[in-house]
Image (tube, grey):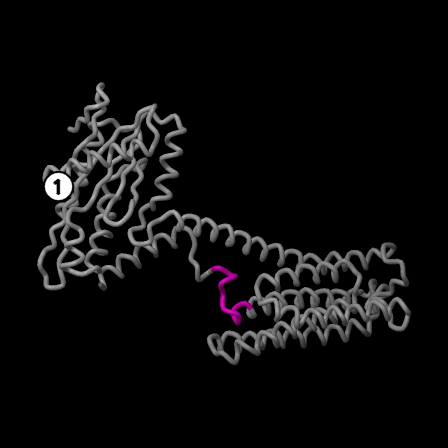
Amino acid sequence: MKQIRGLLAKILRLRIKKYLIEDEVVINWGILKKCILMLVLGCIVHLSWLSWDLFVLFHPEYWQYVQIKLIRLQLILDSSFLLILLALIYPCYKWQGHARAERYLPHLTVGVFVISLCRDAYVVGVMSPVSTLACVCLMTVGLVLFHRALIYSILIPAFLFLAVCTYLSFRHQIPYSPLFNIQGKFFDNGFWLGSMLYFMLPILAICTMLFEILLSQWRHRERLIQHLSQLDPLTSLFNRRSINQCLEKLNHSACLSYALVLLDLDHFKKINDQYGHHKGDETLIKVSAVLSQQLRKSDVGGRFGGEEFILVLKDTNIEMAQQIAERCRLAIQQLEIQSDEGTKIPVTASFGIAISQAELRPQQLLSQADRALYQAKARGRNQVRAYITSTQPELELYS
């Protein structure tokens, strides 16, 4: 049983490593790990604000465009929010996996992050481009990363706050964009426009990068799901549906000739009954590995159901198909499979081959291969038989 689990784990690791490491998908992270990501993004935004505050303070020629007292206050507040966001990273990292922390910390971290941005949106103008962009991008990212109940519970009060600020500024009860001396002429103030662009760039860059990561991982995940849906879960060979699709494509392609090989493990029910189903599974896994080793890169192998397998050999004539089938037969016969008591479990297989023809549909070809397989079993098993098309329809020939 341990050997089966080990083989299955190895196959799954290889498949996942090839397409996607599921644990590293951002959308699959734990909620506190997502909170850390959000906090880091918030720190980057506030660092850009601090850089702007310091730039203005050290360049007096721009003081005419801003409220310099408010800039000094803004410097203190941005520093405070940055320290708070940094401080919240530690409990999010430390308490991952704790139920109570995962219940309450996300509300605290996302709430502090949104409150800090709401204040920034007010001081630069709630209807400014940077505020609009931040609201749209962060709401979208939040809904992708977190449960919608968490996001709506925080964003709805935030939007109400911004709506009230908009109404009060429209009624001239509070100043609009109190950080700047714009006097209602937004686009005549080049410093205001430059500042808007500066504030927008980090938000746009961060959210674009995050969207690209999520979209890329979503596409990888879709490819992985599609790929796994084509495989037999036990053997990792193609399943019956995938093989049928492959045959349909070959039937409509310009492939010169291909061979179908059906093989059935001899007395497989006896292995299950006498040695246990876990040994039956181990046999199927090892047989599938042997078949994969014997096939060429252009060939396709699949599990057709139960102990029956199928090989699709492209650009192959009857002689080549017989050689490949014979190699597979010998490799299966030489498999080393032991029972729980240490005795060797004999494993053999019977093979039936059919060669494609222009007038034959895939199901007709499968029927011919199945007849050849029946002949192999009827004549003593553990052998290869090929269906030979006769010029006389009433005759069936085998080699």
Element marked by disc 1: loop
Crowding around mark 1 (Cα neighbors within 10 Å: few <14, some 14 to 19, many 20+) is many
In the figure, is residue 148 to the left or right of 269?
Answer: right
The x, y position of residue 67, in whole percent, is 84, 70
Quadrant of the image occupied by residue 366: top left
* Along the viewing direction, whichever of 353 and 34 lies nearer the viewer: 353
The x, y position of residue 394, in whole percent, is 21, 23
- Residue shown at the point (24%, 22%) measured from the top left: 393
Q: How many marks?
A: 1
Q: Main secondary structure of the magenta part?
A: helix
* Along the viewing direction, whichever of 72 and 167 lies nearer the viewer: 167
Q: Quadrant of the C terminus?
A: top left
Amino acid, disc 1: Arg
The x, y position of residue 15, in whole percent, is 36, 52
Which residue is labeled 1 in the image? Answer: 381
In the figure, is residue 39 to the left or right of 384?
Answer: right
Residue 33 falls inside the magenta stretch? yes
* Along the viewing direction, whichever of 111 and 378 lies nearer the viewer: 378
Residue range corresponding to the magenta coloring: 25-34
Furthest toward the bottom, the residue is 100
Residue 355 vs 71, above or below: the answer is above
Q: Quadrant of the N terminus?
A: bottom left
Residue 371 falls inside the magenta stretch? no
The x, y position of residue 396, in whole percent, is 19, 26
- Residue shown at the point (27%, 37%) measured from the top left: 296
